[in-house]
Amino acid sequence: VLPDDAARRDDLEATARRILGAAGYRRIETPIFEATELFARGVGEATDIVQKEMYSFDDGGGRSLTLRPEGTAPVCRAYVEHGMHKLPQPVRLWYLGSFFRRERAQAGRYRQFWQVGAEAIGSDDPALDAETIVVLVELLEAVGVRSARLRLGSLGSPETRAAYRERLAAHLRSREDELSDEVRRRIELNPLRAFDADHPGTQRVMETAPRLIDFLTADDAEHFAQVRALLDDVGVAYEIDTSLVRGLDYYTRTLFELTSEELGAQSGVGGGGRYDGLIEQLGGSPTPGVGWAAGIERMLLAAGSVDEESTDGGVDLLVARVPDSPATTAFRLAADARRAGLRAELETGGRSLKGQLKHADRIGARRVAIVGPDGVALKDMASGEQREIPAADVVAAVSGG
Ligand code: AMP
């Protein structure tokens, strides 16, 4: 992350803090690595992430650790470990940090990437599903993500899903010879992934596959209807996608994904859903939750380049030196200015005085203190006006406007 990118990321982080903070989410940061077991159990053994994308290593003490590939399982672990069920529910949390997946790197897909995420744990109210979605949509709008499209689905309960998986597996088996090798090999392990396939034969088979949404229980269908009604109410546009699948096993009920046409092949900007079984699976008592994660790099890519100046801002004072004048006065002046809260830079490039003034122009310095053998001159870069001034008065003069 180079300085120009860092400035845009800082802006994004500030926007996330503002929007999530206003909705009652509080920051949490979990460790970069965790026990491999957490992700194997939390994300799901059969998922691509666990099967082929985790950076796992032996820590030399016989433990297998993994660089975190996602944030929900660690946040839920922290919820259980730190007794957050005793806090008023739901507990709203957000995070921003780097994540790691062993993927083939390409534009918008990296092996180390950053995500901002939000989790609301401890309530199964459909208003919370809708709230998290609205907050994510608001964030993407504020960041300037263009052409975002929201797709929404529902997975129902684990029982519904298990019964459905059987039905889907039966459908796949009945036309096994038309499927890609990979899908065929994983019919029993993870038939849902067949919806994701770009293999033409598999896609043909999937056109007539049974749809989970048609098998939801009355409760789950009602929950989904309420989420939709709330989104309609606040005017958030979405499409129902009955074949929506995501690469993590823990989702139940609501599932959503935001994509942007600006991104090409790696079009996912963010996504999430409800995970009512996850905390129990991690050793806590049954606790519902819902959340999402969005990729920082993808958001910035989809927002396009910004023309305006980065928020680095300008420099209040450049302390220039007439060559061969004593270094101490200039050094002390810059230090005093910074201590007084000014942004001050000391000339150290060995430039001629003319070169230093040109440099002052380039970095947008408002004033230049020219330190010579016999005193200091303060130059206003906007007006070009220059006057002699005692060294001890420079900071006050610059602070004063
Ligand atoms: P996921 O955790 O897979 O649901 O991903 C959530 C979001 O993280 C995606 O929509 C992307 O914006 C981002 N993301 C996931 N994997 C990567 C990656 N390898 N490189 C960059 N961004 C990623």
Image (spheres, grey):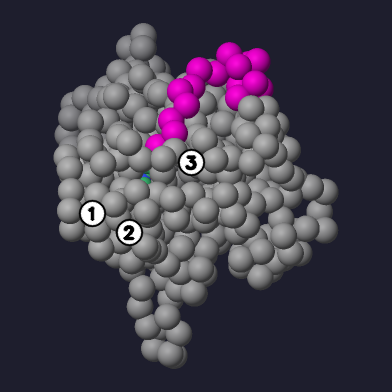
- Residue 32: image location, x then y, percent: 46, 64
Residue sitting at the far bottom: 61
Using the numbered discs, state the Cα–Cα distance from disc 1 to disc 2 in whole angstroms: 9 Å
Element type at mark 2: loop
- Residue 208: image location, x then y, percent: 32, 36
Specify whether 55 is left or right of 284: left
Q: Quadrant of residue 269?
A: top left
Q: Residue at x 61, y 67 (%)?
A: 282
Residue annotated with mark 2: 187
Residue annotated with mark 3: 212
- Residue 293: image location, x then y, percent: 48, 43
Cβ of mark 2 under 8 A from ligand 1: no
Q: Does the segment drawn in magenta span residue 350? A: no
Using the numbered discs, state the Cα–Cα distance from disc 2 to disc 3 in whole angstroms: 16 Å
Residue annotated with mark 1: 176
Q: Nearer the viewer, residue 144 or 152?
A: 152
Q: Quadrant of residue 99?
A: bottom left
Q: Say whether marks 1 and 2 touch (CB < 8 Å).
A: yes
- Residue 86: image location, x then y, percent: 82, 58
Element type at mark 1: helix
Vertical order, 106 against 223 (above or below): below
Vertical order, 57 against 1 (above or below): below
- Report the amino acid beneath label 1: Glu
- Report the amino acid beneath label 3: Leu
Neighbours of disc 1 within 10 Å: few (<14), some (14-19), many (20+): some
